[in-house]
Amino acid sequence: QKEVEQNSGPLSVPEGAIASLNCTYSDRVSQSFFWYRQYSGKSPELIMSIYSNGDKEDGRFTAQLNKASQYVSLLIRDSQPSDSATYLCLINAGGTSYGKLTFGQGTILTVHP
Amino acid sequence: EAGVVQSPRYKIIEKKQPVAFWCNPISGHNTLYWYLQNLGQGPELLIRYENEEAVDDSQLPKDRFSAERLKGVDSTLKIQPAELGDSAVYLCASSSGQGYNEQFFGPGTRLTVL
């Protein structure tokens, strides 16, 4: 089992729909969770971070964390064509501040007009 | 606030040649990371610094890769000698504190080894 796995893509949604991106992880002692967006040929941009169970909202983005089930998800409401990109989750595993940092392989999202 | 600066942006070299990448983190960020990203994959951590100290270099191929962060600010990643399989994007990121803090990435250096 991979340490961090994202739902296989590509994911295609119509403009205005909700896009749901998921990430599961294997280390139960993971501490911090991040979602990044990466446009083709560019570097990753931070969307949001989440550290506690539950939902965290920022504009059209909502991160959801469930440590018991070992998954973190990102919902994008009212998806726009400009949201078309690769979405990466990053997990800081282990029980210390120097825990292992692992990215998922990424999910390609396409929002079509 | 200026972002993470990397240079060069692109580098093409012959195999067995040495190559170096430079990174200047966001001002005040004491944690610096080097990642390698292959096409279609997520970034993979090579080394993490807290100030001058490399606190995690477990994924750095030490037979050919080396890194330094003198004075706890700028950092240099070196490959000597380069191999064909080293062709990738090398990303530098920084964050403001230990452990959990959010990382901000530079534009990356795209390395092509011929």
Image: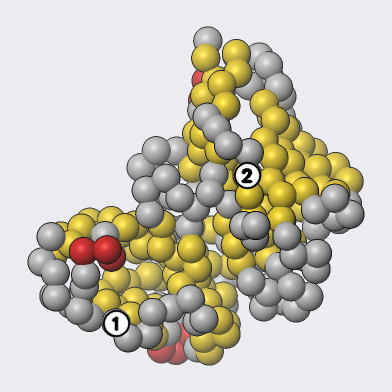
- Which residue is tagged 1? B64
In this rendered view, identify the residue nearer to me: A86 or B98: A86
- x and y percentages locating residue A57 in the rendered image: 79, 38
In this rendered view, identify the residue nearer to me: A92 or B99: A92
The residue at the point 52 percent across, 86 percent down is B54
Q: Are marks 1 and 2 on the same chain?
A: no
**Three-letter code for the amino acid on which mark 2 is drawn:** Gln
The quadrant in which residue A99 appears is bottom right
The residue at the point 60 percent across, 13 percent down is A14
**Three-letter code for the amino acid on which mark 1 is drawn:** Arg
- x and y percentages locating residue A23 in the rendered image: 69, 46
Q: Dot 2, how many residues are within 10 Å of its Cα: few (below 14), some (14-19), or many (20+)?
A: many
- Which residue is tagged 2? A6
Which subunit holds the residue at mark 1?
B
Q: Dot 1, how many residues are within 10 Å of its Cα: few (below 14), some (14-19), or many (20+)?
A: few
The residue at the point 85 percent across, 50 percent down is A69
Instruction: Tell me if residue A9 can be seen.
Output: yes
Left or right: residue A70 versus residue A45 is: right
The quadrant in which residue B101 appears is bottom right
Q: Quadrant of the C terminus of chain B?
A: bottom left
- x and y percentages locating residue A107 in the rendered image: 55, 38
For the image shown, how many numbered marks are present on the structure?
Answer: 2
- x and y percentages locating residue B102 in the rendered image: 64, 60
Left or right: residue A109 versus residue A94 is: left
Left or right: residue A63 versus residue B9 is: right
Relative to A54, residue B85 above or below: below
Relative to A19, residue B27 above or below: below
